Amino acid sequence: MTLISMMGSDAVKIVAHHPIVWFTRRIFSGVVVVWAAATFAFLIQCVLPGDRAQIIINATSGNVGLASSAELAAINAKYGFDQPLAIQYGKYILRILHGDLGESYQQHRPVAGIIAEQIGPTIILAVTALLLAWIIAILTTLFIAGRDNMWAKLLNDTQVFFATAPPYWLATILLVVFAVKLRIFPVIGGSSPAGLILPTLALALELSGFFGQVVQNEFTRVLEQPFVASARARGMSDFGVRLRHVLRHAALPGITLSGWALGKLLSGAILIEVVFARQGLGGVLVAATSSRDVPIVSGAVLISAGLFVLVSLIVDLTYRLVDPRIKLT
């Protein structure tokens, strides 16, 4: 390889790792993800069984009888269902680009406004559960990783149990024990801080077990690295070594999974909100699904895709901050 070609190769690598190039690539990939989600949501509306105009009329009137041809024609003209699919798809994408997610068939209101009113409590629940899951995973890992005693084995088995327990089942158990039997927390979650505790636990316990197993395995491996022995030789305490040196390296795999975890939490939060009768997207989506209010469901799919892209970007930046040696790719 000539010197010029080597220099050219190095220049390409430098450009590829430049923050602006990296950010542009991530934005482009994020746009592709949201576009794919929008296309999926559109296709779902088209392939669902039943006539869309008939569904809208039934949702509006509350009747299940067949509408007249004139009524169907009026709805088809209003929503553009009588146009070719390619034109419908093009208009659908243009509306999304302008922030228009359509109109609810049942509530006759913009979907964006309906979701904006309800998504706040759902995001708060998901983020709070993610933070609590990390706190539980870190604390347990600091005390049990690399140790061989009864308490370490007990905590490890507990992590495995929580990692495999369905959040919906955990939510039901927590509700019955702490709300119905002991009456420590309200049965109906509402929007109060006290009503946030049990739903957060129901989501965080499962995720903490999963994070704990991932971080603990990496933590045990890092404990055997030479720099750990060097830190101990300098007189640092065992807990100090674990907290200041080992944890930073062991947490990287868990941080990588945090983007996926938050997406999982958002979908799980919807079910948990129904269990605890909390305000949020859960009740709205259940009602929209039962009434086949497709614009609300497809709008929620789009919002979820956008949040996933945003969280993935934040996770990548956090990964870089935790370990500056890692290059942005």
Image (cartoon, helix red, strand yellow):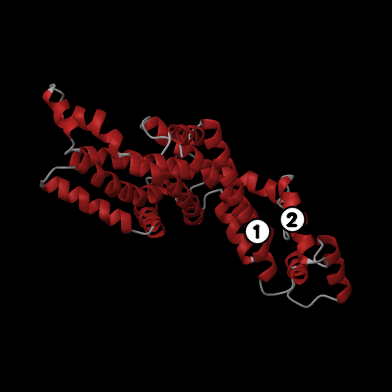
The relative height of residue 7 versus residue 152 in the rendered view (above or below) is above
Farthest top residue in view? 234
Q: Position of residue 230 (x, y in %)?
A: 15, 27
State left or right for residue 52 relative to residue 273: right
Q: Position of residue 6 (x, y in %)?
A: 43, 35
Badge 2 local density, few (<14 within 10 Å), some, or many (20+)?
some
Q: Earlier in the sequence, mark 1 or mark 2?
A: 1
Give me the residue at 46% from left, 54% from top.
Answer: 268
Give me the residue at 48% from left, 44% from top.
Answer: 125
- Amino acid at circle 2: Tyr
Q: Position of residue 177 (x, y in %)?
A: 34, 54
Quadrant assignment, res 105: bottom right
Specify whether residue 48 is in view. yes
Farthest bottom residue in view? 66
Give the labeled residue for mark 2: 92
State left or right for residue 215 relative to residue 285: left
Q: Are marks 1 and 2 in contact (CB under 8 Å)?
A: no
Specify whether residue 292 is in view. no
Q: Position of residue 308 (x, y in %)?
A: 53, 47
Q: Could you say whether the residue bearing mark 1 is in a helix, strand or loop?
A: helix
The relative height of residue 125 versus residue 60 in the rendered view (above or below) is above
Give me the residue at 64% from left, 57% from top.
Answer: 298
In-front residue for pair 134/242 = 242
In-front residue for pair 34/56 = 34
- Amino acid at circle 1: Thr
Say how many tags the image has: 2
Give me the residue at 64% from left, 52% from top.
Answer: 35
Badge 1 local density, few (<14 within 10 Å), some, or many (20+)?
some
State left or right for residue 147 relative to residue 176: left
Give the labeled residue for mark 1: 39
